[in-house]
Image: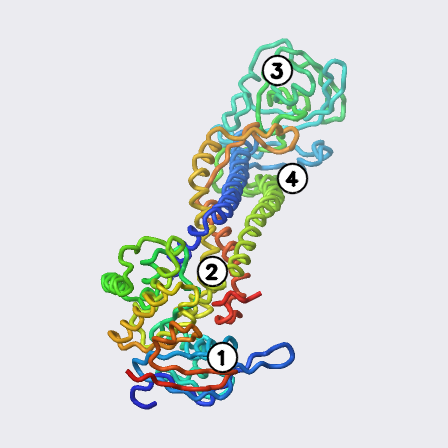
Amino acid sequence: MKLALKLAYKNLIGAGLRTWLNVIVLSFSFVLIIAAKGILVGWDRQAKLDMTNWEIGGGQYWNINYDPYDAFTLEDAHAPVPSQLGADIEAGDMIPVLIAQGTIYPEGRMQSILLKGIDPDQTILELPTRKLDTLVGATPVIIGSNMARANKLEVGDYVTIRWRDANGTFDATDICITEIFSTNVPTVDLAQVWLPMDSLQSMLLLSGEATLLTFRDREKPRDEIANWKLMSYKALVQDIEEMIKTKSVGQSIFYTILLLLALLAIFDTQVLSIFRRQKEIGTYVALGYTRREVVGLFTIEGGMHAVLAAVVGALYGIPLLIWFARTGITLGVTSADYGFAIADTMYPVYSGTLVIGTTLVVLLTTTIVSYWPSRKIARMNPTEALRGRLQ
Amino acid sequence: MEDNLIIKTEKLTKRFPMGKSEFTALKGIDLSLGTGEFAGLIGPSGSGKTTLLNIVGSLDTPSEGKVIVLDRSIGNLTAKEAARLRKEKLGFIFQNYNLLAVHTVYENVEFPLLLLHIAGTERKRMVLDALEWVGLTDKIKQKPPQLSGGECQRVAIARAMVKKPSIVLADEPTANLDAANSHNILQTMVKLNKELKTTFLFATHDEKVISYLKRKIYLLDGKLDKDETVSN
């Protein structure tokens, strides 16, 4: 084996430019796969972190009627905050959120929105809820930058909102924008207005009621509560995981094509080698190799392209990927376009598993592609090979 | 097998498929060679000399008859056994040298010893000895494309001889060499034959080679035509 490795290395280096062309193409695949996968891992991590910080905390209790994908459920999706959660709320480890449908009238236009009531003193989410404690001439509210952009709203603007209370009666009031926050989480931003919890409860005539409760600690065991659905952190990030899995499949197709191009070059080189190096094959056999051993030698030689590609890829790839991880990549899309948490600039994350996994996949596929044409050697007549007479 | 006898063929026949029919390259050859012989298979192209050499070298198998080389029946050897026989006991010299182009002279000569797993210091000594036999100690770092034809063939001889094989099979070893180089090569082989008692079997129709042979085995149309031993 040691001899075969030494021979294979010598033969590869001896082949000169042909080897290096293959190696460079293959190294591109290496670096690109790691970079692309790194973006997905980075996105996944960043999206989950942003969702945790801005929306879901360590998990939530949902009112049994609440369905975030069906606005019509909101009318019934509220209930008094369960008394057994009072201690957590008191300690600041849980915050109730009340959600209702409403309409906003910016510059005379009409826009459906969600009204979300939250305690201004909460510290679980990054929402700048302290600004809800501002003394202004109308109900103070905070909104996200995408909501502000879509409705041409600015800090200090007064605007009218309308809603239906618990009795079904329409009512309206003016609100004042006291803060516009910037977030990568569209589900706390688009078409949403955050109000002080007390104000919204009073507007809806739902004193002491909530739609959901967000808690801080992900690890703490939680009890099931009647008429409330416990949504674990894992369940809440499942959508983003599914989304990234879908993206990953699409991306895999792209780099599989790139990898196939590199593998095709290696396959071609192997076929050409076997044709051009018949005398050498015959010589190995004459000197005491079995044909199977020669097949092994040529397979190692082909597979070694991947080893060299890993080395070459590391030479330019490591500094490139480190730079990439530090500066990130700006995709020119916003979370509003995607409907999912996505940062303006994404920072790739490269794990050991990703690098080792990619290396193994490329090494394995290269070896298989190298073995394929090398099998022909096993059927070669060495006496014909020695004379270079095979077709 | 009798003492001293290292190659023996009995009614050796070799047929090759040729379209729908067959071509018979060797027709019932009976031949015996002893240790230390310096013999040649002589005949025109197509007479079967290379085929016979390949079968003796376990690179091919007989269609009929028996071939015993160093007490092993060539027709019954597995691929692994045949490879082992070549690796341990046989040396080959080819018309086109068949050196490994990307390896240095030293590495080319070292190769058979690596296959035999000979330890580093011993291996180095054997390689340098072999290169000294052929007068190439000053070229050890060069690669075959940097050498002349004569030098390449001397490297090939060193490679064949380095493991001190029992038999060296040389197929038209001087075909690509000029007269001066041919004589030089042949003198080297005669010297090695004497010093190491290695059996040399040539396949040739080159008069220069023939003039050095101690035994001349003439083949014609796949049959043994004449077998002459040259007296000293």
Labelled disc at residue A298: 2
- Name the residue rendered at 41%, 73% in the picture: B207
Q: CA distance from mark 2 to mark 3?
A: 75 Å
Query: Which residue type carries mark 3?
Result: Pro
Q: CA distance from mark 1 to mark 3?
A: 105 Å
**Image depth: mark 4 or mark 3 in front:** 3
**Image depth: mark 1 or mark 2 in front:** 1
Horizontal and vertical percent position of residue A152 = 68, 16
Query: Which residue type carries mark 1?
Result: Gly
Horizontal and vertical percent position of residue B17 = 59, 78
Query: Which residue type carries mark 2?
Result: Phe
User: Do the residues indicated by labels 1 and 2 lie within the same chain of the protein?
Assistant: no
User: Do the residues indicated by labels 1 and 3 lie within the same chain of the protein?
Assistant: no
The part of the image, by quadrant, that contains residue A205 is top right
Q: Secondary structure at mark 4?
A: loop
Horizontal and vertical percent position of residue B66 = 44, 87
Labelled disc at residue A140: 3
Q: Is residue A10 left or right of residue B187?
A: right
User: Do the residues indicated by labels 2 and 3 lie within the same chain of the protein?
Assistant: yes
User: Do the residues indicated by labels 4 and 3 lie within the same chain of the protein?
Assistant: yes
- Reading the image, the residue beneath label 1 is B48
- Reading the image, the residue beneath label 4 is A64
Vertical placement of residue A341 versus A142, above or below: below
